[in-house]
């Protein structure tokens, strides 16, 4: 392909990396807010994603224009398809982080005793952060990144995520049974934590897309 096409790919990859970095920063600050009981930091964390949808749409538009201008084939086409699908997954992760941050803030101000879940929530959150950071590092070093290695690392974090969520789900179900008037609130907490579980699934989707872009084969994504 022509140098202009390579430059356009680098531009698109840079836009994706920037959007992912904003999501990671928001996630990190949400975790800090929870660990330090800093209620103001929740709002700050969400401010990084105020233009999430607009930024994601800009990336999609650049990808579509690249399709139209250059008519890529074979490996180049596969890479652009991967980027287009990847942007959708990243957008949905960002939206999940925003909702998680807002709802976690509300839970911490409510009547639920979150202390029994604190350590597990922190560990669950860290699995998603670790996976996102692996992906971000790969995007920054795309020429030397081993997609197989990244996929394995992300799968390890997703497996931890599933195990931790299963443990907390059982704990919350017990709390719901005993909570009486707070039962509904604990049900909401479970729904909030499920967003982290879904984010874990989406990181696997992105790792799968990176593997597809580098190695080919079939795309297999969580719904």
Image: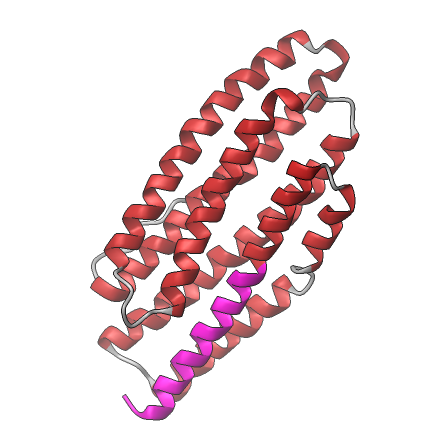
Q: Residue at x 24, y 74 (%)?
A: 75
Q: Check the image and name the residue furthest to the front.
A: 36
Q: In the rendered view, would you say 166 is above or below 211?
A: above
Residue range (magenta): 1-22
Q: In the rendered view, would you say 113 is above or below 220?
A: above
| Quarter that holds the N terminus | bottom left
Instruction: Determine whether, in the image, residue 219 is placed left or right of residue 19.
Output: left
Q: Residue at x 45, y 53 (%)?
A: 132
| Quarter that holds the C terminus | top left
Q: In the rendered view, would you say 111 is above or below 6?
A: above
Main SS type for the magenta part? helix
Residue 33 drawn at (x, y percent): 68, 43
Picture quadrant where residue 146 is located:
bottom left
Q: Residue at x 38, y 51 (%)?
A: 205
Q: In the rendered view, would you say 74 is above or below 155?
A: below
Q: Is residue 48 magenta?
A: no
Q: Nearer the viewer, residue 146 or 2?
A: 146
Instruction: Determine whether, in the image, residue 189 is placed left or right of residue 76.
Output: right
Q: Nearer the viewer, residue 20 or 77?
A: 20
Residue 101 drawn at (x, y percent): 67, 44
Residue 43 drawn at (x, y percent): 75, 50
Q: How is the image coloured?
A: secondary structure
Q: Nearer the viewer, residue 69 or 161?
A: 161
Q: Residue at x 35, y 85 (%)?
A: 6
Q: Is residue 7 magenta?
A: yes
């Amino acid at each position: 392909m022509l140098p202009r096409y390579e430059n356009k790919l680098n531009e698109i990859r840079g836009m994706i990396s920037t959007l992912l970095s904003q999501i990671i920063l928001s996630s990190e600050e949400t975790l800090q807010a929870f660990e330090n009981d800093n209620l103001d930091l929740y709002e700050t964390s969400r401010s990084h994603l105020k233009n999430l949808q607009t930024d994601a749409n800009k990336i999609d538009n650049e990808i579509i224009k690249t399709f139209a201008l250059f008519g890529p084939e074979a490996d180049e086409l596969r890479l652009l398809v991967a980027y287009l699908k990847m942007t959708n997954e990243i957008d949905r992760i960002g939206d999940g982080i925003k909702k998680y941050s807002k709802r976690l803030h509300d839970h911490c101000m409510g009547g639920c005793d979150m202390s029994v879940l604190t350590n597990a929530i922190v560990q669950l959150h860290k699995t998603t952060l670790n996976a996102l950071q692996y992906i971000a590092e790969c995007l920054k070093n795309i020429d030397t990144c081993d997609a197989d290695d990244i996929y394995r690392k992300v799968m390890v974090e997703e497996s931890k995520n599933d195990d931790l969520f299963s443990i907390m789900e059982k704990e919350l179900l017990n709390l719901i049974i005993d909570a009486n008037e707070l039962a509904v609130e604990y049900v909401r907490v479970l729904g909030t934590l499920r967003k982290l579980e879904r984010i874990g699934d989406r990181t696997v989707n992105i790792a799968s897309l990176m593997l597809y872009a580098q190695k080919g084969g079939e795309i297999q994504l969580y719904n």
